[in-house]
Amino acid sequence: MATAAPHSTRTLPMSHPEITTRATRWTGRVLTAIAALFLLFDATMKLMGSPAAVKGTTELGWSAHHLPILGGSQLVCLALYLIPRTAP
């Protein structure tokens, strides 16, 4: 007769999100800064109507008059991402 394996109540080491190291925190900050700077640069180029942004947008099938709408929505999303209570 086979017996069932004993039930383990051990938790994984990373199951406590409140325990973070200094390196982990700074890695998150650096990655957030890289993403935020890229989105800010892209939104700025769209709002300024740079030729590269117009070319890229039209190649993707959007009209050039959509650039301010896309740039503005990027800025709103970036703001929501950078505000701590609205980010995941």
Image: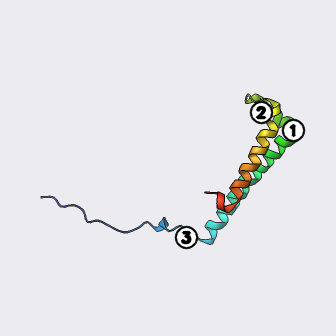
In the figure, 61 relative to 35: above or below?
Answer: above
Q: CA distance from mark 1 to mark 3?
A: 44 Å
Q: Count up the numbered dots.
A: 3
User: Which of disc 3 and disc 1 is earlier in sequence?
Assistant: 3
The quarter holding residue 23 reads bottom right
Q: CA distance from mark 2 to mark 1?
A: 11 Å
| Nearer-the-camera pick, 52 or 83 | 83
Q: Which coloring applies here? A: rainbow
Are dots 1 and 3 in contact, CB under 8 Å?
no
Q: Which mark is residue 50?
A: 1
Q: Which mark is residue 18?
A: 3
Image spot of residue 63 (x, y percent): 79, 29
Name which residue lies at 73% across and 58% down. Answer: 33
Q: What is the three-letter code of the residue carrying label 2?
A: Thr
The quarter holding residue 68 reads top right
Name which residue lies at 64% across and 57% down. Answer: 87
The quadrant in which the C terminus is found is: bottom right
| Nearer-the-camera pick, 70 or 58 | 70
Q: Which residue is mark 2?
A: 57
| Nearer-the-camera pick, 40 or 71 | 71
Image spot of residue 39 (x, y percent): 75, 49
Q: Residues within 10 Å of mark 2 (few under 14, many from 20)?
A: some
In the figure, 69 relative to 86: above or below?
Answer: above
Image spot of residue 9 (x, y percent): 35, 68
The quarter holding residue 66 reads top right
